[in-house]
């Protein structure tokens, strides 16, 4: 029995046609959300810190809905490989319902109880006062965000990657222009500061959603959405969907809570440290946006092969992405370390905050590369149908290593800020060892389509032969 491998030329073609457009679209989407922090830099460290705290709330919101988005991408890509339009419709309707519920709940709290949310993350009254108008306005954008994400994921999974890229580019331009007008009070408009940045975020979110919706409804050739099929979840589909989404949801939710606990520690540091962390999160977000986009692309590529029953090709793709993505991350982080001063100067930081930022980037050069490797493998497990292993491993390591170490360093021992920051990524190396072994085993291949299940036994036989060859070599 011969293995069905892919050549590096085939892999490079998949990266070029699918992965890179998705990565750049993700980069543009993330950039749009970070433009606020960058452009508010001229208003001083206090405004930067306030927007940074609000970004942490948005990160928790992201963690609460992304489990459903990740599950949707799993089903979209495998159903796309199996050419099941009905399955794609059901996945879209169910995922959208859950995600919209989360968006409405978070939006309502952000609009009506902003002091409550902000008080969780910091005890600095002056920061909270600046942040309240910003988070109130952004709260209206939360439901729009989840709708844009589910439409974008559907397009990615069905290999229509150019439309989300275009919509993100237009939204970025709209956000930048409105920020420039409203933050600084151009063309006779009032100088709104942080609140002006929030208005730019809201309007750009509306524009992004309109563009995506128009193209989604216009394209009748790739996948046609039918309302009746979207909300017809019989035949055990909802149970199957939730069984796959639940581990991903737990992963994202518990990860978000863990990061919230870490952010509580950071929010009790000095104002310079909080501002430096806000600037670092923006730069980290650029790195995450690119490798996160590549991770989403890997889900599409791997999930399509697994769903179609071509498991060995999916396995080979995972190996390729596990090498490519950390290498790209290291290169991006190295550029950040080399050009740390001009990058950090964009945020209007003081001398102390600038010094913090320089060493934070240096620490992230190693930690970010390892983190990318773990992230890409866990994403590929989900695309293959296995959502439990990566979830359990990440949550155990986060809550037994990273969160306790950071909390003790910052809240008990009151160590210097950079020492506290160094503990944020202490769990990544341990996860790396376990995930490399699990990836090599191929046990994460668990298709949800009939086409994928038919060839699963053949794949297991191929993997058994590979292990025998290694043992006898």
Image: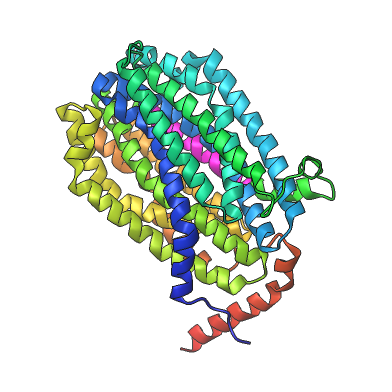
Query: In the picture, residue 458 is in which quadrant?
Result: bottom right
Q: Which residue sits at x=75%, y=46%?
A: 90
Q: Position of residue 385 (x, y in %)?
A: 64, 58
Q: Is residue 68 visible?
A: yes
Colouring used for the render: rainbow
Is 413 positioned to the left or the right of 350 in the image? right
Q: Residue at x 55, y 33 (%)?
A: 145
Is residue 265 in view?
Answer: no
Which x, y percent locates residue 176?
36, 30
In this rendering, the answer to whether 281 lies above or below 187 is: below
Which residues, given as a range, are shown in magenta?
246-265
- Residue nearest the observer in this picture, 244 or 101: 101
Q: Is residue 350 left or right of residue 317?
A: left
Residue under the point 31% across and 17% down: 186
Q: Is residue 257 left or right of residue 172?
A: right
Extreme residue toward the bottom, this view: 472
- Could you say which is closer to the camera, residue 205 or residue 281? 205
The residue under the point 62% across, 58% down is: 386
Majority secondary structure in the magenta region: helix
Nearest the eye: 467 or 252: 252
Estimate the x, y position of residue 219 in percent, counting from the top left. Answer: 65, 48
Q: Nearer the viewer, residue 445 or 312?
A: 312
Residue 400 drawn in magenta: no
Q: Position of residue 345 (x, y in %)?
A: 20, 33
Above or below, 221 relative to 196:
below
């Amino acid at each position: 029995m011969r293995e069905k491998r892919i050549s590096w030329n085939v892999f490079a073609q998949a990266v070029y046609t699918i992965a890179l457009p998705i990565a750049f679209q993700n980069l543009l989407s993330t950039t749009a959300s970070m433009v606020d922090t960058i452009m508010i830099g001229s208003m001083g460290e206090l405004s930067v810190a306030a927007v940074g705290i609000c970004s942490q709330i948005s990160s928790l919101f992201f963690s609460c809905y992304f489990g459903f988005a990740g599950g949707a991408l799993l089903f979209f890509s495998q159903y796309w490989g199996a050419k099941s339009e009905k399955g794609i419709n059901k996945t879209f309707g169910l995922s959208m319902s859950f995600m919209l519920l989360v968006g409405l709940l978070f939006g309502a709290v952000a609009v009506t109880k902003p002091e409550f949310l902000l008080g969780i993350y910091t005890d600095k009254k002056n920061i909270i006062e600046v942040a309240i108008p910003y988070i109130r306005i952004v709260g209206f954008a939360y439901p729009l965000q989840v709708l844009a994400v589910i439409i974008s994921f559907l397009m990615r999974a069905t290999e229509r990657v150019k439309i989300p890229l275009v919509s993100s580019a237009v939204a970025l331009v709209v956000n930048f222009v409105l920020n420039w007008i409203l933050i600084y009070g151009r063309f006779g408009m009032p100088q709104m500061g942080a609140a002006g940045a929030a208005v730019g975020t809201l309007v750009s979110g509306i524009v992004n959603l309109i563009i995506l919706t128009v193209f989604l409804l216009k394209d009748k050739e790739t996948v046609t959405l039918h309302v009746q099929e979207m909300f017809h979840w019989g035949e055990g589909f909802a149970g199957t969907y939730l069984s796959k989404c639940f581990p991903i949801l737990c992963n994202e939710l518990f990860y978000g809570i863990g990061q919230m606990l870490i952010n509580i520690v950071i929010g009790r540091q000095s104002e310079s440290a909080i501002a430096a962390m806000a600037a670092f999160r923006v730069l980290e977000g650029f790195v995450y946006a690119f490798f996160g986009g590549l991770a989403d692309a890997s889900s599409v590529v791997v999930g399509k092969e697994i769903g179609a029953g071509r498991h060995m090709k999916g396995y080979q793709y995972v190996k390729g992405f596990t090498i490519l993505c950390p290498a790209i991350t290291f290169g991006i982080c190295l550029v950040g370390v080399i050009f740390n001063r001009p990058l950090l100067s964009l945020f209007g930081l003081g001398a102390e905050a600038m010094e913090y930022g320089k060493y934070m980037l240096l620490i992230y050069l190693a930690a970010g590369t390892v983190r990318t490797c773990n992230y890409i493998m866990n994403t590929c497990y989900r695309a293959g149908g296995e959502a439990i292993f990566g979830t359990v491993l990440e949550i155990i390591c986060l809550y037994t290593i990273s969160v306790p170490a950071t909390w003790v360093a910052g809240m008990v021992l009151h160590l210097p800020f950079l020492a506290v920051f160094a503990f944020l990524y202490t769990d990544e190396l341990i996860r790396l060892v376990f995930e490399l072994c699990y990836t090599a085993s191929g046990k994460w291949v668990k298709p949800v389509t009939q086409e994928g299940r038919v060839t699963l036994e053949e794949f297991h036989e191929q993997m058994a032969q590979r292990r025998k060859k290694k043992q006898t070599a």
